[in-house]
Image: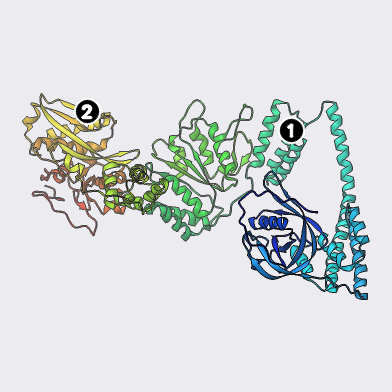
Amino acid sequence: MSAPEPQASRPRVELPALPAGAVPIVPIRSVALFPGAVAPIALGREQSIAAAQEAVRSGHKIALLAQRDPAADRPAAADLYTIGVLATVLRYVTTPEGAHHLVCQGESRFRVVEMLRETPYFAARVEQLTEPGAASPEIEARFTLLKERALEALALLPQPPPELQRLIAGIDAAGPLADLIANFMDATPAEKQDILETLDLTARLDKVIKLLAHRVEVLKITKDITEQTQAALGERQREVVLREQLHQLQKELGESDESDGAVAQLEKEIAAAGMPPEVEEHARKELKRLARMNEASPEYGMLRSYLDWLVALPWSKTSPEDIDIERARQVLDEDHYGLDKVKRRILEYLAVRKLNPQGRSPILCFVGPPGVGKTSLGQSIARALGLKFVRVSLGGVHDEAEIRGHRRTYIGALPGNIIQSLRKAGTRNPVCMLDEIDKLSTSFHGDPASALLEVLDPEQNSTFRDNYIGLPFDLSRVLFITTANVLDTIAGPLRDRMEIIELSGYTEEEKLEIAKRYLVDRQLKANGLDRSQVSISDAALVRIITEYTRESGCRNLERQIGALVRNAAMQIASGKAQRVDFDAAHFENEVAQRTSVPGVATGLAWTPVGGDILFVESARLPGKGKLILTGQLGEVMKESAQAALSLLKAQAVDFGIDARLFEDSDVHVHVPAGAIPKDGPSAGVAMLVSLASLFKNAPVRPDVAMTGEITLRGLVLPVGGIKEKTIAAARAGIKRVILPARNRRDLEDIPPSARSLLEFVWVERAAQALEVALGDPAPPAESPPAAGRRAGTPDRPAARKESARQPGATLGRER
């Protein structure tokens, strides 16, 4: 049959005509064609399409050669076998979708003599291999056996093609029979290629008989298994038929339940859920109710959802814990810079959990200002343990049902956040982060903090009962970690169930390292840049930290770095620059600028987001001794200002102040940032120093900051937040800090990086604070000094040199 020449869909490059004895070659992947067989071949590669079109155009036969590696998309001449089949193209077909197909009939075997070209298609000079014609008794015996085996194999097939049986029975030559059976037999391409390359007829018959014998045995075994399976399933099929008839009868009577499949699936899931015995018994009881319930019933959906929740909870699924202390230390160091005390406590926690896995672990509560890494510490703990991490945000939660769940009697009822997080984790021992526990609120819906008491109590949470589930669930394997900004708003009983770990703010040095190690790279990646395009010097980072961010954490620092990187991205994207470098020049300290005039003192304050410095400014006006207070001061702070003024008036002579100045002057005390409410007793010392500086007309030393409560007798009382306040002082460039002597116990809580930058002066009397801040000698003491180290003595790190003192300063001496 001749095929019409296909229309060219692309420009054809005219090549010289093929020499005599040369034919175009089509590589085939896994289709083996034997002489005498007809087979369709799909063409997808440019070389194959070009070869087929050349064969059709010139009337050549086409050579089919199998690839050694069927996965090769662009085979070379070395990737093809050397023996294949010469075939006649019966038809060349192209589809509207652009696919090309050949229908070929194998003619004879050939061997490649010389490969002539590889592009635009393979072409080679070939040698046809003739079939041996001499017959012998050995060949006839093998011919008879092969035909019997072939007919036997066809008889074992479920639906044997009758035309194939007639074709095999009508063949009277051994070679064509072997090729025909090999072509239709289920064998690998390598096995078929081996038969194709076997030119000796006796050996070829032996190989085909061996493969066919194996297939006959496989077919026999398959038939036996099928018969046995049908016999075993006969009774079950009968049951299925009867059930189907029952289902049709119920449908006619209006009693059909379309949820039979769902009930069966739920039954399997209950069996595989690993529930405790009492829970599984309850689930099966509810499943029976569901099976008897009409699908149109309103309760059907509620009960179905309840059972879905029961089977989805990880009643017995646990993740393996891999506690390696050194690896945990490495993970914590990789994810966080500094926080040595916190890391040490976490490693102690993990060590105890490793030695006593069944013990009741304490509930850790990370307390600190925003941006210091509380939530990321929980993620690091989960990564160090190889456990799942889930986060439950408690900020603004005011409904007890958010913790304990809603009762199933309500429409739209759901379990509480704790049970929902466990379903999300898929395991009963995840690391569960309860974020912002200090921001729970109480309303008429109940008290969520009280609902958390059972969750966070190791003695009770093994039988935690969610209102929706209504069954005890073991939470003892959950590693709960909570976070908070402040402790004051956490209920006392709830705080008692947690171990508090405080995270103070970072010093300037720590922020610089964090920015260099994490923040810069993160912002560069977020904005599609790298360090080869943007450079931010240490001086620029220090200036951002000191001038543009006054926070304990690093969130605003990262935002400011992001602003720089976005500016660089705009310059680079617009083609104005290929690389942008950020640097910073020297800048003046705000503290030095503000305290350069009399009447201004630098105080230290604690805020919910960490420590900060504040300035107390005083001014003297003509008047009659009236005290004016501004700056959004609370009642306690107003009382501190009045106490400071009264103390200054009472001891004016001792302080070297003319008492007549108070009679004809009004005093105005102002704390800047007037839009921000301020309160607390710790500004008493700063207010006294500010007033003394005003009336003595002597500026306060610019490198001194102070905190402490004063009494009318001139005593300095301890205050809280020493760690946060001293970190803020170090961040603001303060060199010397005046602290109450009774706060000396808080010295060990101050980070070493802050201690190395500060000189601590511990005072018991207000006069000693004036001596340090103004350089004046102290008035006579009202009581003997405390035992041990004398009040007013500076604490300096061993490596820090003693600073120069102003004339007249007598630190540590009481007169």
Looking at the rendering, in which quadrant would you find the N terminus?
A: bottom right
Please name the amino acid that badge 1 sits on. Leu
Q: Is residue 83 above or below residue 6?
A: below
In this rendering, does residue 193 appear at all? yes
Earlier-in-chain disc, 1 versus 2: 1
Disc 1 on helix, strand or loop?
helix
Q: Residues within 10 Å of mark 1 (few under 14, many from 20)?
A: many
Please name the amino acid that badge 2 sits on. Thr
Residue annotated with mark 2: 630
Q: Residues within 10 Å of mark 2 (few under 14, many from 20)?
A: few
Q: Nearer the viewer, residue 266 or 225?
A: 225
Kindly identify the residue that appears in the image at 20 percent across and 42 percent down: 591
- On screen, residue 682 versus residue 195, left or right, reads left
Image position, residue 776 (x, y; %): 10, 44
Q: Nearer the viewer, residue 412 or 352?
A: 412
What scheme was used to colour the molecule? rainbow
- CB under 8 Å between callouts 1 and 2? no
Label 1, label 2: how many angstroms apart (C-alpha)?
70 Å
The disc label shown at residue 290, or none: 1
Image position, residue 785 (x, y; %): 18, 48
